[in-house]
Image (cartoon, grey):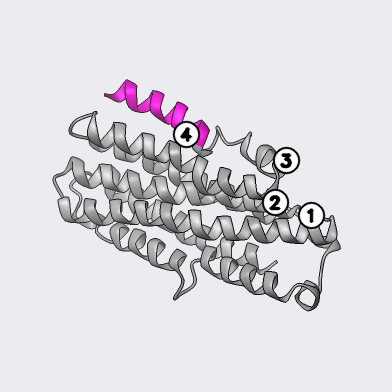
Amino acid sequence: AGIVLVLLLLGAGSKAGLVPLHVWLPLAHPAAPSHVSALMSGVMTKVAVYGFIRIVFDLLGQPTPWQGILVLVIGGATASLGILHALMERDLKRLLAYSTIENIGIIFVSLGLTLAFAANGMTGPAALAFTAALFHVLNHSFFKSLLFFGAGAVLSATGERDMEKLGGLIHRMPVTSFAFLIGSVAISALPPFNGFASEWLAFQAILQSPDLPQWGLKIIVPAIGGLLALSAALAATCFVK
């Protein structure tokens, strides 16, 4: 089961964009037409998440605590590094691609929590973390598709993806600006939008970690929770752009 999990993280992780297998994603998303980028980010990366869930939770049997730790650490690193890269980007579509990596990290943190709780027979917190993961899969497909469509509208109207050369588009493109604002608020996990709802569930699951018996998990889960909170704050900073 351990070997299968590692191979699955390599295979599904490279398709989903887990660090350090993410390098193709910010190259492919900007190169595709914007409506295809929306499908790649909103749907294609989630196919890998679906495959991971079906194999790990349906076929691998009872999870062990180390499996939860492994998925948690990879998810936390993916979320924080993805949004740090996004902060440094000037290219609008590359920024959105790196933001996809961050959100995949959030989903895998929730899946790691599910494994950790399930390994200890804590079915309530495991169900909460699993709900957070599935809800964020759905929510991300909505708001990231909206943002890529907005980026495509800006690109068709201006022929420019460099945000340093863009500005004042709210006057020329009010509908696109309003739609992009909604997507930006949702992806920044601000209430009352859907991104806030799923990330709030993930944090609620993290707050159940003191009941875990293993000291490794008692230390790692709050640390990953701190990384997740940092990533959420940096995402809001990033989308202020």
Q: Which numbered marker is on residue 143?
A: none
- Tell whether label 1 touches label 4 (CB within 8 Å): no
Return the x and y of residue 190 as percentages of the image width and height.
Answer: 49, 72
Please name the amino acid that badge 3 sits on.
Answer: Ala
What range of the chain is rendered magenta?
Answer: 1-15
Q: Residue furthest bottom?
A: 171
Q: Earlier in the sequence, mark 4 or mark 1?
A: 4
Observer-nearest residue: 198 or 141? 141
**Secondary structure type for disc 3:** helix
Instruction: Nearest to the eye among marks 4 and 1: give it.
Output: 1
Seen at 62% across and 38% down, the residue is 25
* Secondary element at tag 2: helix
Residue 159 lies in what quarter of the image? Answer: bottom right
Q: Horizontal and vertical percent for residue 239?
A: 63, 65
Disc with the residue nearer the chain's start (3 vs 4): 4
Q: Are marks 2 and 4 in contact (CB under 8 Å)?
A: no
Residue type, mark 4 in image: Gly
Which residue was labeled with disc 3?
31
* Relative vertical location of residue 106 with respect to residue 29 in this rendering, above or below: below
Q: Is residue 34 magenta?
A: no
- Looking at the rendered structure, the secondary structure element under dot 1 is loop
Label 1 Cα neighbours within 10 Å, binned few <14 / some 14-19 / many ≥20: some
Residue drawn at 72 percent across, 40 percent down: 31
Q: Residue 13 bears which disc, if any?
A: 4
Residue 75 location (% of width, % of height): 44, 44
Number of the label disc, if any, that sits on residue 161: 1
